[in-house]
Image: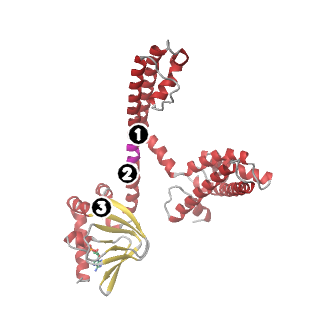
Amino acid sequence: MTRRAQICLLVDLSNQSLAARRVRRLEVCLNLLGILSVSVGTVEVLTESTRSIAAIVTGTVSVLFLVEYLVRLWIAPEMYQAMTTSESKARLLWAISPQGVIDLLAVVPALAVASGGARLGAESASVFVLLWVFKLAARSTGVALIARVFHNERSALGAAAALFTIVLFSSATVAHWLEAEAQPQFFGSIPASLWWAVVTLTTTGYGDVVPLSLGGRVLGGLVMLSGISVMALLAGILANGFAEEIRRREFMRIWDLVARVPFFSEVGAIALADIVGQLRSLSIPAGVTVIRKGEQGESMYFLVSGAVQVHLGQTRATLKDGEFFGEMALLDRKPRTADVVTVAPCTVLVLEVADFYRLAGQQPALILAIESEAKRRRQAQPIS
Ligand code: CMP
């Protein structure tokens, strides 16, 4: 793999490797530092030296953003490989993409530093807080998740928005009928009444416009109650959308991990989907005792990566990627037979005891395979 392809992989948002996550974290920290320094620079009461430090930090961050921009421009041909073979066209495509435009605008403070000396005027720099916030948002996986949830739930959100609009306009119209005579300045027309309706429906209640008639007050109460219901509906749609999206992502992540365990390779896709739903992943550093001899068995583990040692009296058995452990206590319903310690950073898939027995009913062949390996282990290393 070329150096350019390696860098492209490193900055890929979907790359979950440790190095890629570190690069993303560094970028977020740099971005936050920049936003903080620009914000600090606009505080009038600070001493001149503090503001100078803030300006220098702002300048440094923006220069680093310039370097980042040039690197991204350089690696653009790797990103647009599927679309074009021309390097300059790929760079142009990236430069005019929303990401490229935001990144370019975010480096303008660096250009100002270059043209105007080391210090950047606080007020001119403050304009870029917004751009740096956009830059942060564009790379944030959290923002991407929110965007995805809004996209997935667009029809339900649309229905809630329609309901909101119906209640808004009908309440503004009725309020106009009831209050126009007493308060023509606030309720003289339907558009004028909309302000009261929106403030009441969202339960904000500034109190600047208040219905005076009995009918107007009853209407106000009803609008407030409707507002609470619409907000609850929106919160429910979004909460459900988030839970669904996170479940979907987790499923795909576990699916990828399961594909790396040869033990599951014989299982068909439908059965695998069933198994994936019952597994959760866990990252464990080296030197951790995952299983202690004599304890009750609550789960078994499939090693996706890394290695563990099983302490069998004087000897030790090493288990590597693709192997499993912790099955004996579940099969025999007896305490753990040995200590199991990680000897390298491990990623494991955990199958809880209740799911293990459920799976035994659904996938007998799988449990038979686990049972036969357990039998071999018992014979190979009889444990006291
Ligand atoms: P369990 O008894 O639940 O907890 C300790 C685990 O060590 C055991 O399940 C097996 O998964 C594993 N184990 C025990 N004996 C051996 C062996 N001889 N070789 C490999 N693994 C073993």
Q: CA distance from mark 3 to mark 2?
A: 22 Å
Depicted 292 relative to depicted 106: above or below = below
| Residue 86 visible, this orientation | no
Q: Which residues are magenta?
A: 239-244
Circles 2 and 1: CB atoms closer than 8 Å: no
Q: Is residue 241 magenta?
A: yes
Rendered location of residue 48, percent (x, y): 75, 54
Circles 3 and 2: CB atoms closer than 8 Å: no
Which colour scheme appears in the figure? secondary structure
**Residue at 49% from the left image edge and 44% from the top image edge:** 147
Q: Which residue is mark 1?
A: 235
Q: Nearer the viewer, mark 3 or mark 1?
A: 1
Pointer 2 residue Cβ closer than 8 Å to ligand 1: no
Q: Earlier in the sequence, mark 3 or mark 1?
A: 1
> Where, quadrant-wise, is the C terminus in this rendering?
bottom left
**Residue at 52% from the left image edge and 16% from the top image edge:** 183
**Residue at 41% from the left image edge and 48% from the top image edge:** 245
Q: Amino acid at mark 3?
A: Val
What number is the disc on residue 19? Answer: none
Q: Earlier in the sequence, mark 2 or mark 1?
A: 1
Q: Nearer the viewer, residue 182 or 92?
A: 182
Q: Amino acid at mark 2?
A: Arg
Q: Residue furthest right?
A: 116
Q: Residue furthest top?
A: 181
Q: Which residue is mark 2?
A: 247
Q: Residues within 10 Å of mark 3 (few under 14, many from 20)?
A: some
Q: Residues within 10 Å of mark 2 (few under 14, many from 20)?
A: few
Q: Which residue is mark 3?
A: 267
Q: Nearer the viewer, residue 91 or 40?
A: 40
